[in-house]
């Protein structure tokens, strides 16, 4: 289902990402699969910066269980991308992010999508409740 194109004001946090030469495909624009890599990098990078995710010592980790994207405008190397991040749904062990990709200083998203994380025990890979600190931070992104 097609959604309305979002603007920067629809998001609560932002991450700056650079495109790479390899991101362009034979058509001269960024291949659609790269958008998902940018979602992943923006969300996980932001969680690391905020201390919500600890890749080495954390008892839990986030696994991606669903993602989707709508495309409104082409992106390409050498664009500098700002990824807007917002929490759209928060469960006891899962979180759904809305992510928008903005080239340069543009107000409207060139691409936008969703990205669902499930918090799991690092060893067993079974769902684990989000900590109260994580819930508090994720609520600030709603």
Image: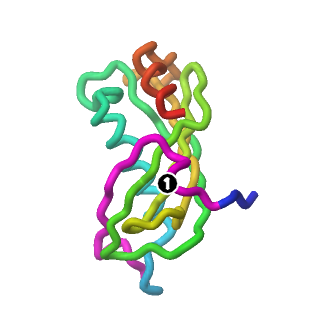
Q: How is this picture coloured? A: rainbow
| Residue 56 percent location from the top left of the image | 24, 28
| Residue 20 percent location from the top left of the image | 29, 70
For disc 1, the neighbor class at 10 Å (few under 14, some 14 to 19, many from 20) is many
Instruction: Read off the residue under disc 1.
Output: 8
Residue in the foreground of this view, choosing between 84 and 33? 84
Q: Quadrant of residue 82?
A: bottom left
Asked if residue 131 is positioned above or below residue 65 in the image, the reply reads above
| Residue 90 percent location from the top left of the image | 58, 27
Asked if residue 74 is positioned above or below residue 69 in the image, the reply reads below
| Residue 109 percent location from the top left of the image | 52, 62
Determine if the magenta segment contains residue 115. no
Specify the farthest residue to the top: 132
Identify the residue shown where x is 41% and y is 56%. 37
Give the residues in magenta: 5-25
Residue in the foreground of this view, choosing between 104 and 45? 104
Residue in the foreground of this view, choosing between 21 and 10? 10
122 displayed left or right of 120: left
Identify the residue shown where x is 48% and y is 20%. 135
Which quadrant does the C terminus fall into?
A: top right
Label 1: which secondary element: helix
Identify the residue shown where x is 35% and y is 49%. 15
Which quadrant does the N terminus fall into?
A: bottom right
Specify the farthest residue to the right: 1
Q: Quadrant of residue 26?
A: bottom left
């Amino acid at each position: 289902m097609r959604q309305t194109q979002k603007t920067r004001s629809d998001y609560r946090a932002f991450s700056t990402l650079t495109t790479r030469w390899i991101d362009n495909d034979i058509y001269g624009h960024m291949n659609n699969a790269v958008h998902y890599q940018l979602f992943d990098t923006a969300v996980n990078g932001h969680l690391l910066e905020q201390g919500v995710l600890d890749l080495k010592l954390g008892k839990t980790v986030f696994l991606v269980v669903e993602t989707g994207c709508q495309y409104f405008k082409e992106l390409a190397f050498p664009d500098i991308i700002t990824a807007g991040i917002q929490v759209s749904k928060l469960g006891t062990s899962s979180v759904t992010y809305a992510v928008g990709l903005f080239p340069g200083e543009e107000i409207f998203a060139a691409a936008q999508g969703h990205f669902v994380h499930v918090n799991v025990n690092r060893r067993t890979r079974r769902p684990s409740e989000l900590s109260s600190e994580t819930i508090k931070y994720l609520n600030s992104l709603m």
